[in-house]
Image (tube, rainbow, N blue to C red):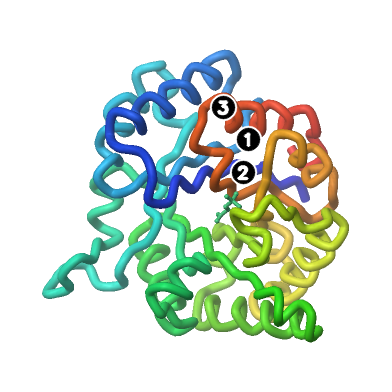
Amino acid sequence: MSRKPIIAGNWKMNLLQSQAKEVFEGVKDFCKDYTAQELPTVVIAPVFTSISAVESVKCDCGCGGKKISIAGQNCHWENSGAYTGEISVEMLKDAGCDYVIIGHSERRQYFSETDEMINKKAKAILAGGLIPIICCGETLEQRESGVTDSWISGQIKAALEGISSEDVAKSVIAYEPIWAIGTGKTCDSDEANRVIAMIRNTVKEVAGAEAADSIRILYGGSVKPNTIAEQMSKSDIDGALVGGASLKAESFNEIIANTMKVAVNA
Ligand code: PGA
């Protein structure tokens, strides 16, 4: 099974509209020299207020919007209503998003998101025709006490509960060990590959072999231009969710370029 790699940039709460546009233009400039086929799936998740700024420049290269997709960093599971401060899947779609990141450890930790909420969001995203990027990962304490695999397979089972195999197949999972996020401590790539293979096995248990074969599972946590080639050379790692290194076009482009050099999954 060949899975097209994904390089997704999670800008978190960074970049004002003009800055977002500048970084986006830099990525677009790099991508224009390659066909959508040659490129990995490139996804950028700006803050909500910058989505329209990047959307307005997305398609003027004539690629029909196929080269760079936009993601929301979060959503609510209802379509509309009295949920002050929230944003719905329909609204993200209306603004030009194709993907939504859900269950990021920062949302779980600082905004008390539960597995149940993440499951509701995943269902709403798929029902709305978008693709969820479902994050999971363990803390350093969990890793040290040897519960990494059971914790993560629990997160995955809860997130995918009640979702059809067909929808699971088109979803994306990002394995992000919390201790590796923003710390410069990348997870050893053999270990990241082992956990990701374990996640694939969990997907097989809940949604069958075909879905497990199709679903793209990314690694995230201090991914840099000099780490991506080794990560992409591993059997089960289908791409990366990149935080810090996605805030500058230069480093994000280098990550895309180095991904294209290692075409194991392409
Ligand atoms: P980082 O963030 O690349 O800065 O470690 C990754 C993420 O949180 O998605």
Between the C-alphas of marks 1 and 2, the distance is 5 Å
In this rendering, which labeled residue sits more in front, label 3 or label 1? 1
What kind of residue is marked 3?
Answer: Ala
1 or 2: tag closer to the N-terminus: 2
Q: Position of residue 15 (x, y in %)?
A: 36, 39
Q: Which residue is mark 1?
A: 40
**Looking at the image, which residue is at 53% across and 77% down?**
159
On screen, residue 99 above or below 163: above
Regarding residue 78, the answer to whether it shows in the image is yes
Between the C-alphas of marks 3 and 2, the distance is 12 Å
- Is the residue marked by circle 2 packed among few (<14), some (14-19), or many (20+) residues within 10 Å? many
Give the image quarter of residue 49: top left
Beta carbon of the mark 2 residue lies under 8 A of ligand 1: no
Q: Quadrant of the C terminus?
A: top right
What kind of residue is marked 1?
Answer: Pro
Name the element at disc 1: loop
Is 242 positioned to the left or the right of 78 in the image? right
Regarding residue 166, the answer to whether it shows in the image is no
| Residue 163: numbered disc | none
Marks 1 & 2, CB-CB < 8 Å contact:
yes
What kind of residue is marked 2?
Answer: Ile
**Looking at the image, which residue is at 33% across and 61% down?**
128
| Residue 6: numbered disc | 2
Give the image quarter of residue 203: bottom right
Q: Position of residue 187 (x, y in %)?
A: 77, 58
Name the element at disc 2: strand
Q: Position of residue 193 (x, y in %)?
A: 81, 59
3 or 2: tag closer to the N-terminus: 2
On screen, residue 126 above or below 113: above
On screen, residue 94 above or below 173: above
Name the element at disc 3: loop
